Each structure stands twice: as C-alpha cells, then as structure tokens.
Image (spheres, helix red, strand yellow):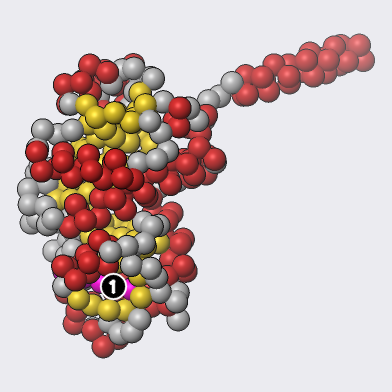
Amino acid sequence: MMMKKILILLVAALSIPALMAAQAQITTKKVKIEDFTEKVTKVVLSGNMFYDSTLKEAVREHWTISPYEFCSIEDFQEMKTDADYYFLIKVKGQFRKESGPGIEFLSLLKGGPEAEKGLDKMLELITFPYAAVDSPSGRETVFLPLMLNIVQQHVLSSIATDIVAYSPLIAYSNNIGKIKGKQVIMAEEDLSADVLQLEDDYLKAPIVVTDMDTADEYVAGNVADAVVSYTVCPEDPQPGAFCYKMLVNAEDGELYYFRKHRITRKTGPGFLVEDMNRIVEALD
C-alpha cells in the first residue's frame, strides 16, 4: 500500500514539470508584439486626398518607433494576412444600439491569417477615437500628431508589460494627478450642458474655457504645461451612441484622462459633472 502511494506521488511529481512546460508555451500579447519595432508598419491611406496628405505629414514628422511604409486599401486587403506587417488604419465603429457607424478610430493591428475572418479578429494593439464619421470638426487634424504619440507610447509600454497590453484606454485616467500645476484648456464645445450651467462651480482658474480654435492653438503650438480637452462623438449623437472625453498634454501628447459614456435622453455629449469633479479634485 505504501509503495502504491509512493508511486502515485512520484507520477504526480513527474507531471508537474510537464504542466509547467505547457503553461510556459502560452503566448501573451506582450510576446506576440515584441517584434513591433523591427517590423514594417503599413500606414493605410483612405483615398481621401485631404486626410491622406495630413496623415502622411504627421507620420513623417512623428512616427519614430518602427519603419513604416504607406499603402492603399487594396494593398491592405492583399497583405493583411501577413504576420510580418503591422497596419495603422482608420476604421468606422458602430455600437449595438446605433443605426450606423458614428465614429472613426485609428486602429493599430497586427497582420495574420485570422484577418481572413475580419478586422475584428486581427490582433489589436490600440484603437483610438479619431473623429465623427459624417462631419468631422477639423480638430482631428490638429490633434493627429498627439494621437500618433499616444499610440506609439502605448505600444512601447505594451511591449514592456502585459499589464498595459491588456488594459483598456480608460486606465490612462490614472494619470489625472499629473495635471496638477498645469493650465487646463477646455473647449466650450467639449462641455456638457450640465457643466456649462454650473460654470461658477467648475470653470475657474487654472481651468480656462475657450472656443475650439483657441484651444487648438495650444496643441498646434505644443505649448508647455498646457492640457487640452478633446471629445469625439457622432455628429448627431442618438441614445445608445458613445462620447469619448480626453485630456492631452499639448506639448508631447501624454494622455492624462480618458473616459467614455453612453448618450441617453438625459445625458448628452461632452465632459459631464462627474468628469469635472475628478478634474477639479486633481487640480486641488
């Protein structure tokens, strides 16, 4: 009987290394993308002359973490199954309760055989809200260099740790404390009706409320110690759509705040009172 127990224990002991070896073969997202800086990123052009020229200029001036090449949509369709390429592409997003796509995103994807089943099956490194589909405000062209910086920093951080690789963008709201001591520039168009009604409670120094054009001048000028608001939602947001709200460092594109909320009959687009409570608390 004792010998039988010893044999069972021995078999169990021998099985442990085999189980550990099997677990060691699990490939995490961090491992899957660790070749990013060595592979070519294909920047997919849309065919829209204005957008493509803006994208080309921004990529040439700001993309630094990997070799890149520009390609057409047709090229993307041919190469998307090739794991030797990554793709930076503008995509349209439609949520379950929306009648059609309302927001465009910049998405960074890794090529591979799974692409045959659709873009949503490709390995996603980051998908960042860009602009409204039907009527972009024009602000997206000003913020594009900062968006590229955010994308690149996220990739480098994802390569360093799986914690970032698997974390949603909302995790960047943990950076909200970094706005302390900085000037927060908020475009009036980024604020919800409820916040505008409570202007005396929230919209005071070091928060500066101004029009979009003036706010964007801080971004275009890469003004130091300035944090600028940016929101993305459909042109005519209906209940069920989402609004994305961000605070971005105008100088280097560091993302300090990222939240989204669903549009309802009572809750419209823009920074909500709960967002402003977080911002004011971080500034105190």
Residue at label 1? 185
The one of 23 and 254 positioned closer to us in this rendering? 254
- Residue 62: image location, x then y, percent: 33, 45
Residue plotted at (83% across, 18% down): 9
- Residue 116: image location, x then y, percent: 26, 18
Residue plotted at (14% across, 34% down): 46
Tell me, yes or no, whether the highlighted magenta stretch contains residue 113: no
Which amino acid, mark 1? Ile
The one of 218 and 190 positioned closer to us in this rendering? 218
Residue plotted at (49% across, 44% down): 157
The one of 268 and 62 positioned closer to us in this rendering? 62
User: Pointer 1: residues within 10 angstroms few (<14), some, or many (20+)?
Assistant: many
- Residue 48: image location, x then y, percent: 9, 37
Name the quadrant of the C terminus.
Answer: bottom left
Q: Residue furthest bottom?
A: 200
The one of 60 and 211 positioned closer to us in this rendering? 60
User: Does residue 10 lie above or below 85 as drawn?
Assistant: above
Is residue 129 visible to the viewer in this orientation of the structure? no
Write down the region rendered in magenta.
Answer: 184-189
Residue plotted at (47% across, 41% down): 156
